[in-house]
């Protein structure tokens, strides 16, 4: 075994330089969200079954799936990596990656982040450390921390560095999640110029358009890039989810349903992000009075099989909504009981479930049984903590809209007024916000003001 440098200057223990080159190909495929990620990693392990970092990478990739079978695979990969590292020479960088993987498998996301951040102090071009920090901070709702982490490594990257565009796109998304939309838009569009197939960068720009209420522009932008997404894995469904949100804001409800069937929920949609895409979009459609037919059924079937995982509180929330929307109250109740048991355990997601996830589940169940006042009572005090569920601001907007809907249905005018005031300050050009404002004003007997709010919504649609 020797030490060979990858294209970013990181030295990895391996049998040959070609094994490290294969490792870099797997990492690059991951950055591009390509279907061939696994094929590249398998090729590395076949050529060099004793490369420690290849097994660590296998563990990382398994952990991303957030399923029980892949969790077991990731644990086995970590065990193999530990055996290789303990019996041979290895670098502190490799040992730190193994500690981070083991810590992540233990569910301690903040502690794993600290290890990756320490790696980046000395190795700011360690691509997996950069992306793993972002992934875990994302699922802890830490947008500013994402931005600051990406900022700390920028000194080591420039346009001559392999993969620079991918790091730029990651930085763009971190800017967006910390509310700096102009910077996010600029960096995201530059990343797409570098590589039109960079779907993560494209999705960062889509988030900017969503948060700044530019649905027509966002839809055109993504539609123009779609031809470059051949070979992208399931994340393409999420990019198409963004297109669905834009079509929805434009009031093109039939087009949203057609788009959902053709692009958001395809035959290979199976993972937790696919379920969250489906649940978030179908709920928005149904809330606006659109008949979504039996589309909840497949989401509920998949969710029912995952009620005991609890690897991400964000995923549990969407599983709950899918079950309730399909009338699977018994299975939803089983999920709630299982969540409560998991909340008593260790780890970051247990804490999030305990502090926020259970309240959101209870609110969803209350709405489902026709008790919106109960939903408001349980969720309103937690509103400021919902970001800890992780996901993006755009994804969590589902939960905020759910609370607004509950307040309106319950006649909780004070809460509805406060929530809509906050939303209109943040997104004054949101058609949905003005339509719900009209509902509130109408329910209070302010017919003239309600008409003005509806007129504003129409003007926004005409101007889009």
Image: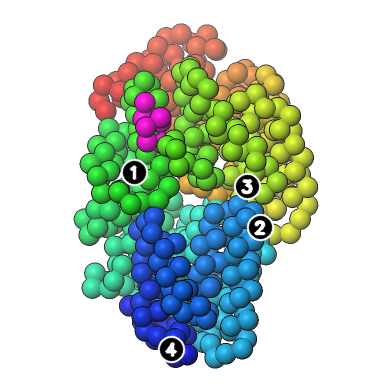
Along the polypeptide, which appears first: circle 3 or circle 4? 4
Residue on which disc 3 sits = 313
Residue 80 placed where, x, y %?
61, 75
Residue 189 placed where, x, y %?
25, 52
How many C-alpha atoms fall within 10 Å of the one at disc 2: few (<14), some, or many (≥20)?
Answer: many
* Left or right: residue 371 compared with residue 434: right
Disc 1 element = helix
Q: Is residue 404 above or below residue 157?
A: above
Q: Are marks 3 and 1 in contact (CB under 8 Å)?
A: no
- In this rendered view, identify the residue nearer to me: 303 or 18: 18
Name the residue located 54 percent from the left edge and 28 percent from the top edge: 296
* Left or right: residue 339 compared with residue 179: right
Compute the Cα span from label 2 to label 1.
29 Å
Residue on which disc 4 sits = 3
Q: Are marks 3 and 4 in contact (CB under 8 Å)?
A: no
Q: Nearer the viewer, mark 2 or mark 4?
A: 4
Magenta segment boundaries in residue numbering: 258-264
Q: Is residue 353 visible?
A: yes
User: Which mark, residue 206?
Assistant: 1
How many C-alpha atoms fall within 10 Å of the one at disc 4: few (<14), some, or many (≥20)?
Answer: some
Disc 4 element = strand
How many C-alpha atoms fall within 10 Å of the one at disc 3: few (<14), some, or many (≥20)?
Answer: many
Compute the Cα span from label 3 to label 1.
24 Å
Q: Nearer the viewer, mark 3 or mark 4?
A: 4
Main SS, magenta region, reads helix
Along the polypeptide, which appears first: circle 2 or circle 3? 3
User: Which mark, residue 348?
Assistant: 2
Along the polypeptide, which appears first: circle 3 or circle 1? 1
Name the residue located 30 percent from the left edge and 48 percent from the top edge: 229
Compute the Cα span from label 1 to label 4.
41 Å
Residue 438 placed where, x, y %?
45, 17
């Amino acid at each position: 075994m020797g030490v060979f440098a990858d294209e970013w200057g990181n030295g990895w223990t391996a049998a040959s330089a070609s094994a490290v080159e294969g490792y870099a190909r797997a990492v690059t495929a991951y950055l591009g969200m390509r279907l061939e990620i696994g094929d590249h990693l398998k090729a590395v392990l076949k050529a060099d079954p004793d490369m420690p970092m290849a097994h660590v990478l296998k563990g990382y990739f398994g952990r991303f799936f957030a399923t029980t079978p892949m969790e077991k695979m990731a644990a086995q990969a970590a065990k193999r990596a530990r055996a290789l590292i303990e019996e041979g020479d290895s670098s502190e960088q490799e040992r730190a990656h193994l500690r981070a993987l083991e810590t992540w498998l233990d569910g301690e996301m903040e502690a794993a982040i600290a290890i990756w951040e320490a790696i980046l102090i000395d190795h700011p071009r360690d691509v997996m450390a950069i992306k793993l920090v972002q992934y875990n901070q994302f699922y802890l709702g830490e947008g500013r921390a994402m931005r600051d982490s990406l900022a700390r490594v920028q000194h080591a990257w420039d346009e001559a560095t392999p993969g620079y565009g991918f790091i730029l796109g990651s930085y763009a998304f971190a800017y967006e999640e910390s509310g700096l939309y102009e910077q996010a838009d600029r960096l995201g569009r530059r990343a797409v110029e570098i590589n039109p197939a960079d779907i993560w960068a494209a999705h960062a720009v889509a988030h900017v358009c969503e948060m700044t209420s530019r649905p027509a522009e966002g839809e055109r932008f993504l539609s123009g890039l779609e031809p470059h997404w051949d070979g992208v894995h399931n994340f393409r469904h999420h990019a198409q989810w963004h297109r669905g949100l834009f079509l929805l804001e434009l009031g093109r409800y039939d087009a949203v349903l057609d788009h959902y069937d053709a692009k958001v929920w395809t035959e290979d949609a199976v993972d937790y992000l696919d379920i969250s895409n489906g649940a978030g979009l179908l709920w928005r459609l149904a809330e606006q009075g659109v008949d979504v037919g039996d589309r909840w059924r497949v989401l509920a079937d998949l969710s029912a099989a995952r009620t005991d995982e609890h690897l991400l509180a964000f995923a549990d929330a969407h599983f709950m909504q899918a079950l309730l929307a399909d009338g699977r109250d018994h299975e939803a109740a089983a999920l709630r009981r299982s969540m409560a048991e998991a909340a008593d355990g260790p780890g970051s997601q247990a804490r999030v479930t305990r502090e926020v996830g259970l309240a959101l589940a209870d609110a969803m169940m209350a709405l489902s049984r026709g008790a919106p006042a109960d939903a408001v009572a349980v969720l309103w005090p937690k509103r400021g903590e919902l970001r800890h569920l992780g996901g993006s601001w755009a994804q969590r907007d589902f939960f905020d809209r759910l609370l607004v809907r509950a307040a309106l249905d319950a006649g909780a005018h004070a809460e509805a007024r406060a929530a809509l005031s906050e939303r209109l300050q943040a997104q004054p050009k949101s058609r949905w916000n003005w339509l719900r404002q009209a509902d509130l004003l109408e329910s209070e007997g302010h017919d003239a003001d309600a008409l003005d709010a509806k007129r504003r919504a129409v003007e926004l649609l005409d101007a889009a």
